[in-house]
Image (cartoon, rainbow, N blue to C red):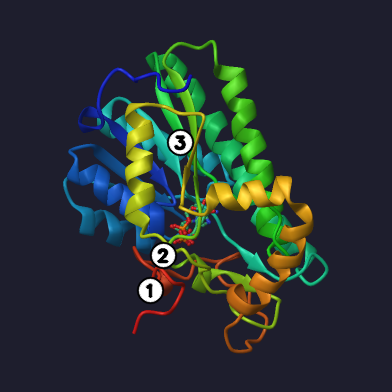
């Protein structure tokens, strides 16, 4: 499947971005609109999807829906089909995150993080793959993470969810590989400057910070648009991704010494905060936006 070109370029495509109201999803939706695609954005808040659709303009649809809810995804996809008559590509950037050790994060929060990554991605795939099949093709892009290939202390809920999501995506690739015109790609970013760090739940006693090197979300948006035109099994975005994966796999002794230090000194270095559910249960629309305010070095922009 790698490097196989899909038939049309992005300009002529109808693309749904689930998670398209913040961070990577929002920047991707904006880029797609700029390149001439017809775009729909979906996330949980009706007010937020309407505001983003209006801001993006060019007929962008704002469709509220929870990726974990099959009826919601059916309704969202039906709305795209009713408006445009087809749906060429679907991107999911929907995710929530929780800080805390595996003992600190409450089981229901752990389950909610997994539900978005695993059940949500599966629900979306089950909704869109039959549509792609019926219309003779389509592309599903799943935004995973570098953390789907390494373990990080105090990020266990998120890491295990992203590992499972990657396995789900790879399984979907295997199960659809003989189907002409159907593509499933994974884009795996390292740290990206988005609101995800501020939106996360925390039970670690501290809020999270983006660990350097932190890239702008535009880098990921470009990679997503590229895989829409030219599907790929797995594309990493981040200068430190391969170094981290190699360290984790080939030098576990060194990795195990450095990772807890990095988490204490960098990831959880912020002031003490009370436990919070962040956006795990309900959206926090006031925190959503294209960027999170982090520099390349993982410092807060003034
Ligand atoms: N930022 C990073 O450093 C980074 C690094 C590696 C991978 N990633 C991955 O990149 C993707 C995008 O992350 P981001 O940083 O752009 O995060 P973000 O700014 O927090 O955006 C997440 C989006 O997902 C939506 N969402 C959350 N739960 C949802 C649900 N149940 N149903 C539908 N939409 C839902 C949010 O909207 P509502 O809350 O309003 O529903 C929001 O639009 C995620 O898969 C994340 O794991 C991010």
Q: Is residue 22 left or right of residue 236?
A: left
Disc number at residue 193?
2
Q: Residue furthest right?
A: 103
Which comes before the other along the chain, label 1 or label 2?
2
Identify the residue position indicated by label 3 in the image.
141
User: For the residues marked 1 and 2, what is the alpha-carbon distance in whole angstroms?
Assistant: 6 Å
User: Is disc 3's CB within 8 Å of ligand 1?
Assistant: no
Q: Position of residue 160 (x, y in %)?
A: 71, 51
Dot in front, 3 or 2 = 2
Task: Please say whether residue 62 is visible from this viewpoint.
Answer: no
Q: Position of residue 254 (x, y in %)?
A: 74, 59
Q: Residue at x 59, y 79 (%)?
A: 207
Q: Secondary structure at mark 3?
A: strand
Q: Position of residue 216 (x, y in %)?
A: 36, 60
Identify the residue position indicated by label 1 in the image.
293
**In this rendering, is residue 38 above or below 45?**
above
Q: Quick check: marks 1 and 2 in contact, CB under 8 Å?
A: yes
Q: Residues within 10 Å of mark 3 (few under 14, many from 20)?
A: many
Q: Quadrant of the C terminus?
A: bottom left
Rendered image quadrant of residue 285: bottom left
Nearest the viewer among 100 and 81 is 100
Q: Is residue 240 left or right of residue 6?
A: right
Which comes before the other along the chain, label 3 or label 2?
3
Q: Secondary structure at mark 1?
A: loop
Q: Residue at x 76, y 61 (%)?
A: 256
Q: Is residue 226 left or right of residue 158?
A: left
User: Is disc 2's CB within 8 Å of ligand 1?
Assistant: yes
């Amino acid at each position: 499947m790698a490097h196989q070109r899909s038939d049309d370029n992005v300009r002529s495509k109808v693309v749904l971005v689930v998670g398209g109201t913040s961070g990577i999803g929002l920047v991707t939706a904006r880029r797609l609109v700029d390149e001439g695609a017809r775009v729909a954005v979906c996330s949980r808040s009706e007010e937020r999807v309407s505001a983003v659709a209006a801001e993006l303009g060019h007929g962008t649809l704002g469709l509220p829906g929870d990726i974990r809810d099959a009826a919601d995804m059916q309704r969202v996809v039906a709305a795209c089909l009713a408006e445009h008559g087809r749906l060429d590509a679907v991107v999911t950037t929907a995710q929530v995150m929780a800080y805390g050790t595996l003992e600190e994060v409450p089981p229901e929060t752990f389950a909610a993080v997994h539900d978005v990554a695993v059940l949500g991605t599966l629900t979306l795939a089950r909704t869109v793959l039959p549509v792609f099949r019926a219309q003779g093709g389509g592309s599903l892009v799943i935004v995973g993470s570098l953390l789907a290939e390494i373990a990080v202390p105090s990020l266990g809920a998120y890491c295990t969810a992203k590992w499972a999501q990657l396995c789900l995506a790879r399984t979907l690739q295997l199960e659809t590989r003989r189907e002409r015109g159907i593509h499933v790609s994974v884009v795996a970013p390292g740290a990206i400057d988005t609101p995800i760090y501020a939106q996360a739940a925390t039970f670690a006693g501290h809020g999270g910070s983006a660990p350097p090197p932190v890239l702008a979300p535009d880098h990921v948006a470009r990679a997503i648009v590229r895989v829409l035109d030219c599907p790929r099994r797995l594309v990493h975005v981040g200068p430190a991704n391969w170094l981290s994966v190699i360290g984790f796999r080939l030098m576990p002794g060194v990795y195990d010494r450095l990772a807890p230090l990095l988490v204490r000194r960098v990831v959880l270095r912020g002031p003490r905060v009370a436990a919070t559910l962040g956006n795990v249960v309900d959206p926090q629309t006031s925190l959503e936006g294209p960027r999170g305010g982090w520099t390349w070095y993982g410092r807060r922009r003034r």
